[in-house]
Image: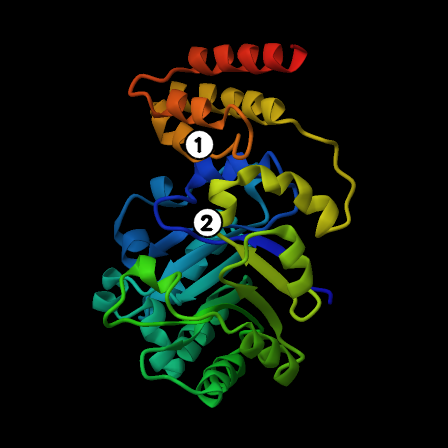
Amino acid sequence: MSYPHKFSVAPMMDWTDRHCRYFYRLMSKHTQLYTEMITTKAILHGDQARLLDYHQDEHPLTLQLGGSDTDEMARCAKIAQDWGYDEVNINAGCPSDRVQSGSFGACLMNTPQVVADCVDAMKQVSNLSITVKSRIGVDDMESYDELTNFISLVEKSGCDTFIIHARKAWLKGLSPKENRTVPPLNYDWVYQIKQDFPSLTIGINGGINHLEDACKHLEKVDSVMLGRAVYHQPYLLTDVDEIIYHQSSSITSREQVLLSFIDYMKVQSQQGVPIRAMTRHILGLYHGQKNAKKFKRLLSGSSVTLDHLYEWLDFTVQSKLN
């Protein structure tokens, strides 16, 4: 399978901001990164620099858009291209109250023609790849045929890449958190989509926590997306380039990652970014290590500084020597 982005970190609201993404890039050169979902109205009427700026090292980088108005989606696709993004992804899977009131996210699975029209409008003004992230269904959308109808209609508009969260979304009765765990996983439907649409690039998402599992999925589909597993255990990214992309990579210790991120935080803090806005993303760096709780306590303090992190590095080095 020739799709270049075999492994990605999912767009996660309030988590995958530019600081988080830079931290991930320190551990994997090839992982595809996504922004948080950003609504079209926020981009068109808000602070574009705050919403869209990123570090050049973040590439390959995808902007995920939330919206359903074809004109707004097209305008944002053009902005994304001008801003230097590599790809734009349409969110057709988020089940939050916010997306329901705005008629986007998982709601869009009920209106595949709207998604198709958005893709068409976006491709007319942009040379970027326009992709779609969806669920396998929503609410009363129960059948595999309804999923294939969604894929088929959107494909005709020129979309050739779908990332499918292998759960239904329940917009009524389940919270966004429950929607990530309560609806049962159905990987077989995603596998079947790949068989029924062999010319399409099909990615899979949902309930995947280990690279070993990712490799098994890659036997059936083109790409695998992990979300919260990476956020809580980010150091697993250090194995992605070798295991998923078969690219040699030098072993990077947690201390090397932290030291590089401190250098980044120095620059950002001089530009007015609060330290805690960045350290909140690295709480899981020592997941599974004997000092993990101590590291989290350090970062959870209200007055954590870069000096505290340098002291931590000295502590970990001494611990290894002893």
The colour scheme used to paint the residues is: rainbow
The residue beneath circle 2 is 228
State how far apart marks 1 and 2 are (Cα).
13 Å
Q: Is residue 49 left or right of residue 320?
A: left
Count of labels shown? 2
Q: Is residue 200 above or below residue 99?
A: below
Name, please, the residue furthest toward the bottom: 145
Q: Which mark is residue 13?
A: none
Q: Circle 1 sits in a helix, a strand or a loop, which is it?
A: loop
Residue at 25% of width from left, 68% of height from top? Answer: 100
Mark 1 crowd level (few <14, some 14–19, many ≥20, 10 Å Cα): many
Residue at 64% of width from left, 65% of height from top? Answer: 217
Which of the marked residues, 1 or 2, is nearer the chain's N terminus?
2
- Split into 4 quadrants, where in the image is the N terminus? bottom right
Residue 16 place in picture, x, y as percent:
43, 45
Mark 2 crowd level (few <14, some 14–19, many ≥20, 10 Å Cα): some
- Split into 4 quadrants, where in the image is the C terminus? top right
Residue 183 place in picture, x, y as percent:
39, 70
Q: Circle 2 sits in a helix, a strand or a loop, which is it?
A: helix
Amino acid, disc 1: Leu
Q: Is residue 313 visible?
A: yes
Q: Is residue 11 left or right of residue 140?
A: right
Name, please, the residue furthest toward the left: 101
Q: Which mark is residue 283?
A: 1
Residue 128 place in picture, x, y as percent:
54, 61
Residue 4 place in picture, x, y as percent:
68, 58
Residue at 43% of width from left, 71% of height from top? Answer: 184
Q: Are marks 1 and 2 in contact (CB under 8 Å)?
A: no
Q: Is residue 37 left or right of residue 197?
A: left
Q: Nearer the viewer, residue 111 or 284?
A: 284
Q: Is residue 137 above or below residue 247?
A: below
